[in-house]
Image (cartoon, rainbow, N blue to C red):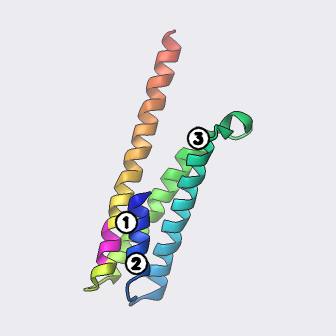
Amino acid sequence: MVSLLIAFICVRSSVWTSYSAYSYFEVVTVCNLIMILAFYLVHLFRLYRALTCISWPLSELLHYLIGTLLLLIASIVAASRSYSHSGLVAGAIFGFLATFLCLASVWLSYKISCVTQSTDAAV
């Protein structure tokens, strides 16, 4: 979340050369921030126990996969359009860092769920 917020602030406070590329980057980072916060609040207040009609692990996995793909595309576009503006370059770098961290989160979540399922099956 912190790397997404830093990427958003870097791009928002810089001078833009391509309005469409950086507005797309801003929309993707803000949407990812909001969705990560929403899933965090669901887990924090244990709302997943009350809302059993939603498959929370599947929805979180889909969110991370789609959000990571969109963030990767936005970071590539921002990096290609940044030229020599240091704030935009920093935003693109933090976008790539956030992409890597989202991929790591997906991998760790999947690994933990597989370990949990295999130990439940053995019992």
Question: x and y percent of residue 100 in the render?
Answer: 34, 54
When the figure is inspected, residue 47 is found, relative to residue 117, above or below; the finding is: below
Three-letter code for the amino acid on which mark 3 is drawn: His
Q: In this view of the protein, which residue sits in the foreground, 27 or 3? A: 3
Q: Quadrant of the N terminus?
A: bottom left
Q: Magenta stretch containing residue 113, yes or no?
A: no
Residue 2 appears in which quarter of the rendering? bottom left
- Disc 2/disc 1 C-alpha distance (Å): 10 Å
The single residue placed furthest to the front in the displayed view is 45
Q: Which residue is drawn at 30% across and 73% down?
A: 90
Three-letter code for the amino acid on which mark 1 is drawn: Gly
Q: Which residue is drawn at 27% across and 85% down?
A: 83
Name the N-terminal-most of marks 2 and 1.
2
Which residue is tagged 1? 95
The boundaries of the magenta stretch are 89-93
Q: Do the residues labelled 3 and 2 touch (CB within 8 Å)?
A: no
Taking the image as drawn, is residue 52 in sight? no
